[in-house]
Image (cartoon, grey):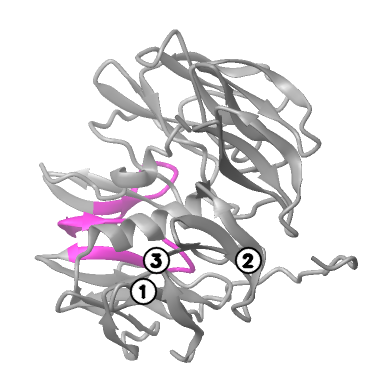
Amino acid sequence: MKRLLIMALALLALCGGCSKEEKRQPFVDDGSQPILVKVNGRYGYCDRSGKMVIPAIYEAASIFTEGMAAVSLYGKYGYLDRSGKMVIDPLYNGALFFKDGLAAVSKDGRWGYIDKSGKMVIDPEFVVTMAFTDGLAPVIVAKKDVGKGGFIDQKGKFVIEPEYDDAASFSEGLAAVKIGKKYGYVDRSGKMVIPVQYDAAAMFREGLAMVKINGMHGLIGYIDKSGNWVIKAEYGEGTNFHDGVAAVRKDEKWFLLERSGKKLIDKEFYIPTMYSEGLAPIVVDAKVGYMDKQGKIVIKPKFQSGSIFVNGLAPVQVGDKCGFIDKTGKMVIEPLFQWDQRTVDQYIHYNTHFVPAQ
């Protein structure tokens, strides 16, 4: 049976200046941002009708976030705006998406951050960086040949000193950090509000975080922001909550849970799925369709693969091609593009990690 490509990142990974503060207005995606697609081995962008609006000439590319997209030409990364204009020249060895007005870029083996004008606002001195969330970004610095994680503000100043063995992005006011072999959670002041005790820990989503106990091959459950168990650790695997639902595995079967821990529907699955905008991909007889939260199939299973809905559209695989359907199942962007795993992974990852569910 062909697996849902939602699997790639639906198992939301447990995380193994100037003196005047600049006010940033949050960017709202109104659904008009160009859609990343792959044509003949190169990346470009189409609009919601399927018309190519930025030619497929790039070796690698990111989805648009905050009106900008990272693209690669001749092995170097720069950024496009929504018109397709290269507004930040391709000067970097690596580039991540924009979040909170800043993007991490790699130069000479180290990572720093640029703003939307292309100005390097935080010097490239970090071994590893991640996106800004809640006004802070987790970074890894080399200390005595050992990587240590901490958190910087948008001026590059350490707000939480690099003293952890690992650090993940803030989400809903808390971030997972690792000391030795165990994880706990800190708040934005650096206070350890949930003690280090877990073998793995994910970002908080919809008020709950998935954590693992009893070793790396142990069990997962879900805690609230006080560290209280809301759903006991009795599952082998799980996903973060999204759209009010999480998938969990017990023995060889997957179930869908509400935030209370109650089963959403009385059905078992062989692979996990994820709800977005009220619908979730489901495999029936080796084909993918979509079901609602009552378990009713509302889009007939007829696709080789399918992913989540974002702004009313979901990518689906027809043969070896990618198209996009609306929530009635109508093909609104014909399957003319290559089905590309990395593109689908980006699409899922950004919208399930960094964009709150509607």
Q: Residue at x 26, y 35 (%)?
A: 271
Sequence-wise, the earlier of marks 1 and 2 is 1
Residue designated by label 1: 76
Quadrant for the C terminus, please: bottom right
Quadrant for the N terminus, please: top left
- Callout 2 environment at 10 Å: few (<14), some (14 to 19), or many (20+)? many
Say what amino acid the circle numbered 3 marks.
Asn
Residue 293 rendering spot, x and y as whole percentages: 44, 44
Residue 70 drawn in magenta: no
Residue designated by label 2: 102
- Callout 3 environment at 10 Å: few (<14), some (14 to 19), or many (20+)? some
Q: Circle 3 sits in a helix, a strand or a loop, which is it?
A: loop
Marker disc for residue 274: none
Residue designated by label 3: 93
Residue 294 drawn in magenta: yes
Question: Quick one: which residue is furthest to the front in this view?
Answer: 144
Residue 311 rendering spot, x and y as whole percentages: 49, 68
- Nearest to the eye among marks 1 and 2: give it: 1
Sequence-wise, the earlier of marks 3 and 1 is 1
Sequence-wise, the earlier of marks 2 and 3 is 3
Q: Quadrant of residue 171?
A: top right
Say what amino acid the circle numbered 1 marks.
Lys
Residue range corresponding to the magenta coloring: 289-317
- Nearest to the eye among marks 2 and 3: give it: 3
Asked if one can make out residue 308 in the rendered structure from this viewpoint, the answer is no
Please say if 206 is above or below 107. above
Viewer-nearest residue: 147 or 228:
147
